[in-house]
Amino acid sequence: MPKAKKQEEPKNVVSIDGSEYKFDDLADEAKLAINHIAQLGGEINALQMKLMQLDAAKSVFMGQLKAALPE
């Protein structure tokens, strides 16, 4: 039977401006900044999705308005 390859633990590495750093080796201040940046990225994505939803809803109401106007 072939030997199963041992799975490597995923490296906890962050890439910043083309350089890679081990997360665990960074100063606490850098770790905190990375966590804030990740959280803000998630919030930005959520807001972009909400904006797309609002734009779609606006288009629906604009269509309803145009249909309700006299010709």
Image: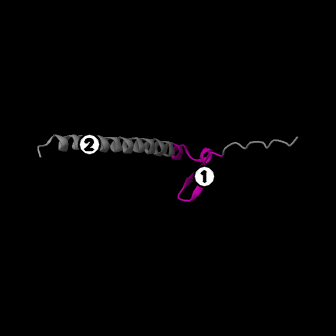
Residue depicted at x 30% and y 44%: 55
Between residue 11 and residue 46, name the one nearer to us: 46
Mark 2 is on which residue type? Lys
* Percent x, y of residue 51: 33, 44
- Crowding at dot 1, Cα within 10 Å, few <14 / some 14-19 / many 20+, comes out as few
Q: Residue 58 carries which label?
A: 2
Q: Name the secondary structure under disc 2.
A: helix
Marks 2, 1: nearer the viewer:
2
Q: Is 13 one of the magenta-colored residues? A: yes
Q: Name the secondary structure under disc 1.
A: strand
Mark 1 is on which residue type? Tyr
Left or right relative to 11: residue 59: left
**Real-space Cα separation, disc 2 to disc 1, in angstroms:** 45 Å
* Percent x, y of residue 61: 23, 40
Quadrant of residue 57 within the rendered picture: top left
Quadrant of residue 67 within the rendered picture: top left
Quadrant in which the N terminus is drawn: top right
**Of the image marks 2 and 1, the number of the one nearer the N terminus:** 1
Q: Is 25 one of the magenta-colored residues? A: yes
* Percent x, y of residue 7: 74, 42
Residue highlighted by disc 1: 21
Residue depicted at x 44% and y 45%: 41
Q: Do the residues labelled 2 and 1 touch (CB within 8 Å)?
A: no
Left or right relative to 58: residue 4: right
What number of labels is visible?
2
* Percent x, y of residue 6: 78, 42
The span picked out in magenta is 11-31
